[in-house]
Amino acid sequence: MKSKTIVLWGREDLLSTSVELFLKVQQGWQVFTISREDPLDVLIQVIDGSHADAVIIHQANCRENAQLPGILLQNHPGLKVIFVSPNNNLMEVYGKQNILVTSSADLISTVETDMFSLPCKTV
């Protein structure tokens, strides 16, 4: 299994504690936990310093900043941003891909390609 670095920005509740424990038992994974009380600047500093592969954010932490996924992805193109919600058991997953376009076929191929191969369940 490939090693991963994950930043968890959440609440001090059962969901966040469970997610943290689940991630920490994965072989080779490093988990940085940031308190809900810490400001957004601390989250960004930890992501910058750790070269995180993913950041998991408790959805309640971002009510004031709807642009957060875009900001994080712009500055960290390989990052996966995951929002978790304890209310409906759904995760919102954001990622960014950069694709060099050399012909119109590249654009058509990008639109046609299923970028997310994970099974999705719509509500």
Image: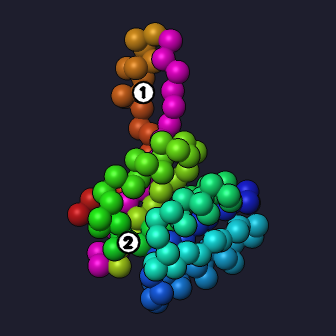
N-term-proximal mark, 2 vs 1: 2
Residue 60: x and y in percent read 34, 74
Callout 2, which amino acid? Asn
Q: Which residue is mark 2?
A: 61
Magenta span:
87-102
Placement of 76 over or under 99, stated as above or below: below
Residue 32: % across, % down: 63, 71
The single residue placed furthest to the top in the displayed view is: 103
Residue 111: image x %, image y %? 36, 28
At x 68%, y 59%, the residue is 50
Is label 2 or label 1 in front?
Answer: 2
Give the structural element (helix, strand or loop) at label 1: helix
Q: Indicate which disc residue 27 carries.
A: none
Q: Could you tell me which secondary element the residue under label 2 belongs to?
A: helix
Q: Which residue is depicted at the point 37% across and 28% down?
A: 112
At x 48% / y 17%, what residue is drawn? 101
Q: Gap in Å between the C-alphas at discs 2 and 1?
A: 33 Å
Mark 1 packing: few (<14 Cα in 10 Å), some, or many (20+)? few
Residue furthest to the bottom in view is: 14
Q: Position of residue 61 (x, y in %)?
A: 38, 72
Locate residue 57 relative to residue 79 in the image: left or right: left
Q: Is residue 117 among the parts visible in the rendering?
A: no
> Label 2: how many residues lie within 10 Å, few (<14), some (14-19) or many (20+)?
some
Type of the residue with mark 1 = Thr
| Residue drawn where x is 35% and y is 66% of the image | 62
For residue 89: magenta? yes
Above-or-below relation of 33 to 117: below
Magenta stretch: includes residue 94 = yes
Residue that label 1 marks: 110
Where, quadrant-wise, is the C terminus in this rendering?
A: bottom left
**Do we see residue 17 in this rendering?**
yes
User: Main SS of the magenta segment?
Assistant: loop
